[in-house]
Amino acid sequence: MTAAAPFRSARLNEVAALLAEQRAQVIAAARTIPADGWTERVTPDGWSPAEIL
């Protein structure tokens, strides 16, 4: 992430840091799905990761 602009409030910086952490968690979770598992449905009436994303 780039350096914060001087006019950004402390709360905006907190939100930006939270979003960056959540983004990293989503990417880490996505990397655990096997390449051929993106279209597999866990249950017949469930959603596959590809359908969700």
Image (spheres, grey):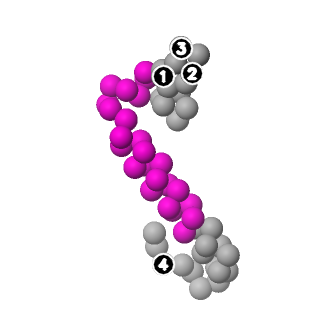
The answer to whether residue 15 is magenta is no
Instruction: Specify start and end residues of the magenta stretch as a single range.
Output: 17-40
On residue 42, the disc is 1
Residue matched to label 3: 44
Magenta-span inclusion, residue 18: yes
The quadrant where residue 38 appears: top left
Report how far apart the C-alphas of labels 2 and 4 lie in the structure.
Answer: 41 Å
Q: Secondary structure at mark 2?
A: loop
**Secondary-structure class at tag 1:** loop
The kind of secondary structure element at disc 4 is loop
Tag 4 or tag 2, which sits nearer the N-term?
Answer: 4
Locate residue 34, reporting x and y percent.
32, 32
Looking at the figure, which quarter contains the N terminus? bottom left
Q: What's the residue at 48%, 20% (across, down)? A: 41
Asked if marks 4 and 3 touch (Cβ < 8 Å), the reply is: no
C-alpha distance separating marks 4 and 3:
46 Å
Q: Is residue 29 above or below residue 51?
A: below
Q: Residue furthest bottom?
A: 6
Whether label 1 touches label 2, CB < 8 Å: yes
